[in-house]
């Protein structure tokens, strides 16, 4: 009899411990809300914080895990490359998105990375793709933004839908088939207002309210993109829309069931090309078209007549691979000679060859190498002096070189995240593996970065 009571007691204890252990395992968030803000900066975010309401940005800063010194691990950065890096957890070297536009060697003309309004040229999987794979397609993924590159690249290859604004009308990405019926219904019912951020907020809240996202057995993903200007009013309005978004979603789903991530795309508004001259800051002009013509003459003097430079674009020079092969020339040697020639020009501080960027493991070149892609970039990448203007007289475009570090934030909020300020230098390619760990799926297939926590 005594043994029988002992046996029952042991079973009760084991059952209790099993239940306690199960309760100790935190439930994965039912909804992940990724908020990417174009032109967001940490210094402005904190400077205007006394003006924020309690439920918006101030709440995320005070109650979230706040990484204050974030940046992209590559250069150059625009909305497309910055968004793609966050979604894929890697850099343009692997994901193929070097920017919104790139030069097609077959046509020698600029091509849009979303030339067919799809993520087909995004060469790796995204966090949303891995979520779809992990749940056998059961998870819901939506993306809403002012710009198509923010919407489509964050949505990934297998989303349920993405929408953006064009001429004050909503556009549904045609690549996600069949077309989501809820999005079609929304377009018929609601017309956009003048404020893009307001429209994105309204759509995101309606999605949570009526599409069923975040309200079934698997984790879902909602991607939202805003744009902010470097002034007081713009940050105050961003605070208002973030407050609406966070409060509305938490009211519907509960705080512990939603994980919010707020960060910048890394895209910062360029300074005026006239500012340096106006304030007597040392400057100058480097003409990429003239440099290309001089280089072609130089190579012709060495290797014989021919069109060695096929085209040039931004800070890149594209060599004629067909001619080089026909003449049986060593491409790496020709690139080295071209590199040495351009380095002698005024305003040039660095010249990188494609061979150098593909083979070097130098940490000094890592930032440049990460932003390079063999299928999208030229044979020579020219770095001009800070403050100088890179000018193309054929396209009438001018950009100002600037190498200064401008940090933006990464904030994780909700889902039992503990409040903490982290001043460490971090990069946006670490967001995807962090979220993947939180929702217990694998990271995107080209992501080698470590989670932030």
Image (cartoon, rainbow, N blue to C red):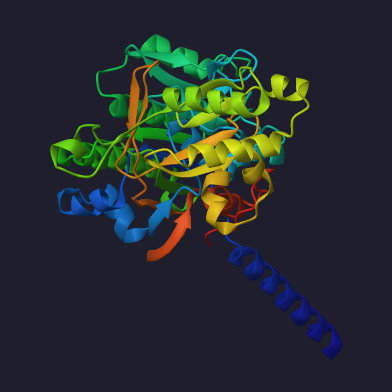
Drawn side of residue 161 relative to residue 411, left or right: right
Instruction: Name above or below for residue 384 compared with residue 27.
Output: above
Provide residue 381's location: percent of width, then percent of height: 52, 37
Relative to residue 275, is residue 186 drawn left or right? right
Q: In this view of the protein, which residue sits in the foreground, 447 or 190?
A: 447
Give residue 6's position: percent from left, percent from top.
Answer: 80, 86
Examine the rendered structure and indicate whether residue 349 appears above or below residue 97. below
Q: Position of residue 298 (x, y in %)?
A: 55, 28
Residue at the image position 22 percent from the left and 51 percent from the top:
54
Q: Nearer the viewer, residue 143 or 357?
A: 357
**Residue at figure coordinates x 22%, y 39% from the top left:** 230
> Does residue 314 appear in the picture of this structure?
yes
Q: Is residue 132 in view from this perspective?
A: no
Residue farthest toward the top in the current orientation of the protein: 188
State the image quarter where residue 423 is shown: bottom left
Q: Nearer the viewer, residue 183 or 427?
A: 427
Would residue 226 be found to the left or right of residue 318 on screen?
Answer: left
Vertical arrangement, residue 114 with respect to residue 93, above or below: above
Q: Residue at x 65, y 69 (%)?
A: 21
> Image quadrant of residue 239?
top left
- In the image, residue 177 lies at what x, y percent? 63, 16
Q: Quadrant of the N terminus?
A: bottom right
Query: Relative to the observer, which residue lies in front, 26 or 441?
Result: 441
Total labels drawn: 0
């Amino acid at each position: 009899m005594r043994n029988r009571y002992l046996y029952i007691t042991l079973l009760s204890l084991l059952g209790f411990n099993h239940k306690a252990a199960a309760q100790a395992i935190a439930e994965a968030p039912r909804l992940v809300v990724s908020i990417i803000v174009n032109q967001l900066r940490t210094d402005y975010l904190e400077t205007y914080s006394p003006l924020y309401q309690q439920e918006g940005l101030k709440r995320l800063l005070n109650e979230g895990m706040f990484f204050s010194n974030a940046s992209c691990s590559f250069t150059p950065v625009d909305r497309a490359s910055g968004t793609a890096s966050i979604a894929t957890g890697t850099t343009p070297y692997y994901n193929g998105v070097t920017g919104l536009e790139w030069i097609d060697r077959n046509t020698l003309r600029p091509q849009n990375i979303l030339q067919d309004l799809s993520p087909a040229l995004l060469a790796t999987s995204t966090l949303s793709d891995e979520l779809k794979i992990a749940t056998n397609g059961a998870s819901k993924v939506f993306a809403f933004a002012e710009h198509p590159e923010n919407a489509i690249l964050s949505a990934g290859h297998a989303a349920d839908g993405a929408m953006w604004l064009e001429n004050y009308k909503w556009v549904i990405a045609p690549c996600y088939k069949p077309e989501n019926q809820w999005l079609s219904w929304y377009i018929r019912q609601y017309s956009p207002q003048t404020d893009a951020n307001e429209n994105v907020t309204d759509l995101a809240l309606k999605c949570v309210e009526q599409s069923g996202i975040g309200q079934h057995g698997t984790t879902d993903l909602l991607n939202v993109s805003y744009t902010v200007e470097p002034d007081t009013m713009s940050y105050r309005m961003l605070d208002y829309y973030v407050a609406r978004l966070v409060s509305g979603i938490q009211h519907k789903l509960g705080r512990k069931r939603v994980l919010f991530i707020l960060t910048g795309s890394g895209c910062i508004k360029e300074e005026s090309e006239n500012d340096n001259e106006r304030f007597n800051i040392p400057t100058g002009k480097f003409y990429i078209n003239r440099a290309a013509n001089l280089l072609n003459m130089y190579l012709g003097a060495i290797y014989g007549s021919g069109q060695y430079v096929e085209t040039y674009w931004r800070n890149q020079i594209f060599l004629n691979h067909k001619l080089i092969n026909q003449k049986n020339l060593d491409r790496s040697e020709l690139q080295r000679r071209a590199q040495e020639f351009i380095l002698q020009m005024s305003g040039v501080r660095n010249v990188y060859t494609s061979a150098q960027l593909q083979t070097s493991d130098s940490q000094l070149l890592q930032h440049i190498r990460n932003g390079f892609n063999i299928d999208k970039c030229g044979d020579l990448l020219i770095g001009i002096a800070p403050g100088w203007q890179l000018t193309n007289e054929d396209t009438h475009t001018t950009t100002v070189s600037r190498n200064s570090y401008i940090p933006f934030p990464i904030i994780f909020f909700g889902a039992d995240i503990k409040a903490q300020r982290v001043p460490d230098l971090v990069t946006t390619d670490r967001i995807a593996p962090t979220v993947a760990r939180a929702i217990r799926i694998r990271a995107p297939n080209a992501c080698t970065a470590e989670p932030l926590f």
